[in-house]
Amino acid sequence: MEALQTREAAARGRVEELREQLTAAESEVSRLVITRQTVEEVLAAPSGALPPGVEPVPVAGLSRAAALLVAAETGGDATVTSPAYRRIAAVFAERSGPLRCKEVCAGLGEEATASRVESMRSKLKRLVERGVLLETEPGLFTLAGTDAR
């Protein structure tokens, strides 16, 4: 009986471990599906469907930003795929050419105070480390894989 109880406990432990792995995998699939659906919706929307005064996002920039973020997320980098970093990537997708920290702050609708600019610089450097952005020259950032002007 003791041997059976030991085997049962071991099997229950394996079951719990597999449940945790399944939950993590389901969560990852869910995030990737939502990301893909969002990109498809944005790409499928006719430019006339945008509110007045809103410029369409360049498809190439949006596609590149989405691919970089999905690659980071698939690699398990939860920091870079947080909403704040997604918003930053969207600013780069919407604009052509390299941007400075102040321009990114403005693109996010934030006041470009010294502390916010420094905070943004740290975030942009983190995105450079993760391969999402490139620093073409000191203080000038662009989306990785785009034409750095």
Image (cartoon, rainbow, N blue to C red):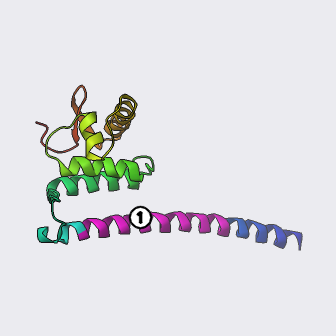
**Seen in the image, is 19 located left or right of residue 26?**
right
Residue 93: x and y, percent? Answer: 21, 51
Please report the residue visible at 71 percent of the width from the left and 69 percent of the height from the top.
11
Q: Quadrant of residue 19?
A: bottom right
Image label count: 1
Please report the residue visible at 21 percent of the width from the left and 39 percent of the height from the top.
142
Residue 10: x and y, percent? Answer: 74, 65
Say if the magenta span includes residue 133. Answer: no
Residue 8: x and y, percent? Answer: 77, 72
Which amino acid type is shown beneath numbered disc 1? Arg
Q: Is residue 92 above or below residue 149?
A: below
Which quarter shows the C terminus? top left
Please report the residue visible at 31 percent of the width from the left and 35 percent of the height from the top.
112
Q: Quadrant of residue 54?
A: bottom left
Res. 41 in view:
yes
Q: Which residues are magenta?
A: 15-41
**Seen in the image, is 57 located left or right of residue 15?**
left
**Seen in the image, is 54 located left or right of residue 116?**
left
Q: Quadrant of residue 45?
A: bottom left
Element class at badge 1: helix
Mark 1, residue position: 31
**Seen in the image, is 33 located left or right of residue 53?**
right
